[in-house]
Amino acid sequence: MTDDAARDLEDLYNYIFMHDSTESATHVLGEIEKVVESLASFPDRGSHPKELQAVGIREYRETFFKPYLVIYRIMEQQVFIYLIADGRRDLRTILEKRLLR
């Protein structure tokens, strides 16, 4: 997991904790961690993000714990997590800032 993705996860936990409850934040964190861990066994299962396909980029994949999105890339049989975000946000802008900088 990249430093950016680790920060995303921490920020998401803190946001849910502050606006909902500790239990909800812990549940979401646990479910996202399950999704991330499952990529070790099934990395090719994710689809290519449409926001990136629109600009001709196909090396990244996405998977979900709805509405939360995990953007990752497979390189040399390793999975690198680049982004964890609420899928209801403006993903195009987020992806451009994070992946195309």
Image: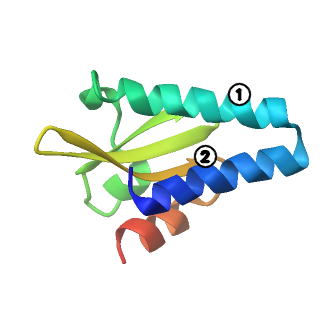
Name the residue at 39% across, 49% down. 1
* SS at circle 2: loop
Q: Find residue 18 and report its horizontal and vertical position in percent.
A: 87, 51
Q: Amino acid at mark 2?
A: Gly
Q: Check disc 2 and report the residue beneath it.
A: 87
Name the residue at 35% across, 72% down. 100
* SS at circle 1: helix
Q: Give 49 or 9, whichever is nearer the viewer.
A: 9
Relative side of 76 to 70, left or right: left
Q: Amino acid at mark 1?
A: His
Relative side of 13 to 81, left or right: right
Q: Check disc 1 and report the residue beneath it.
A: 27
The quarter of the image holding the C terminus is bottom left
Decide: few, some or many residues near mark 1? Use Cα within 10 Å; few <14, some 14-19, many ≥20: few
Residue 100: numbered disc: none
Q: Nearer the viewer, mark 1 or mark 2?
A: 1
Asked if one can make out residue 66 in the rendered structure from this viewpoint, the answer is no
Q: Find residue 57 and report its horizontal and vertical position in percent.
A: 26, 58
Q: Quadrant of the rendered structure where residue 78 is?
A: top left
